[in-house]
Amino acid sequence: MGIDIKLPIGIMFSIFGILLTFYGLFTNSNVLMYQKSFGININVYSGLVMLVFGLAMLLASWKTNKSASKK
């Protein structure tokens, strides 16, 4: 049995995704902050992408551990 890197990657991306999404939601009313990105709240979108990726890694890690425990 080797080291499964999917679990810490999934935890890290999930935590950062949650933090970045909440930061984007709380700073949504700051027009000057998002002027450089043409008014797009990039924090929310990148946070959601990071969260989905982190959850996918956690799901893959869970499935790997589940199938390894059956053997």
Image: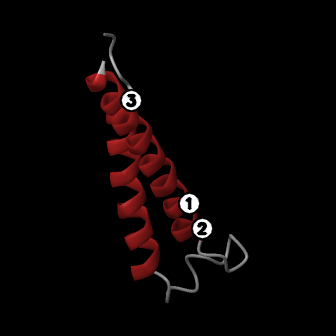
Residue at 59% x, 75% y: name it.
Answer: 41
**Residue sitting farthest toward the left:** 69
Alpha carbon separation for disc pair 1 and 2: 6 Å
Quarter holding residue 26: bottom left
Which comes sooner in the sequence, label 2 or label 3?
Answer: 2
Q: Does 36 appear above or below 64?
A: below
SS at mark 1 in the image = helix
Res 42 label:
2
When the figure is inspected, residue 45 is found, relative to residue 3, above or below; the finding is below
Neighbor class of circle 1 (other Cα within 10 Å; few <14, some 14-19, many 20+) is: some
Residue at point 38% right, 34% down? 61
The N terminus lies in quadrant = top left
Question: What residue appears at the point 50 percent right and 83 percent down from the top-left corner?
Answer: 28
Q: Can you give x and y, in whole percent of width and height, for residue 46 in the image?
A: 56, 60
Q: The residue tagged with tag 2: helix, strand or loop? A: helix
Assess disc 2: are there few (<14), some (14-19) or many (≥20) residues with their C-alpha within 10 Å of its C-alpha: some
- Colour mapping: secondary structure
In the picture, measured across the screen, residue 38 lies left or right of residue 69, that is: right
Q: Earlier in the sequence, mark 3 or mark 1?
A: 1
The 10 Å Cα crowd at callout 3, few under 14, some 14 to 19, many 20 or more, is few
Q: Which residue is mark 3?
A: 64
Viewer-proximal residue among 43 and 12? 12
Question: Label 1, on which residue?
Answer: 46
| Extreme residue in the right direction | 38
Residue at the bottom extreme of this rendering: 29
Q: Quadrant of residue 69?
A: top left
Could you say where residue 47 lies in the image, as x and y percent from the top left?
A: 49, 61
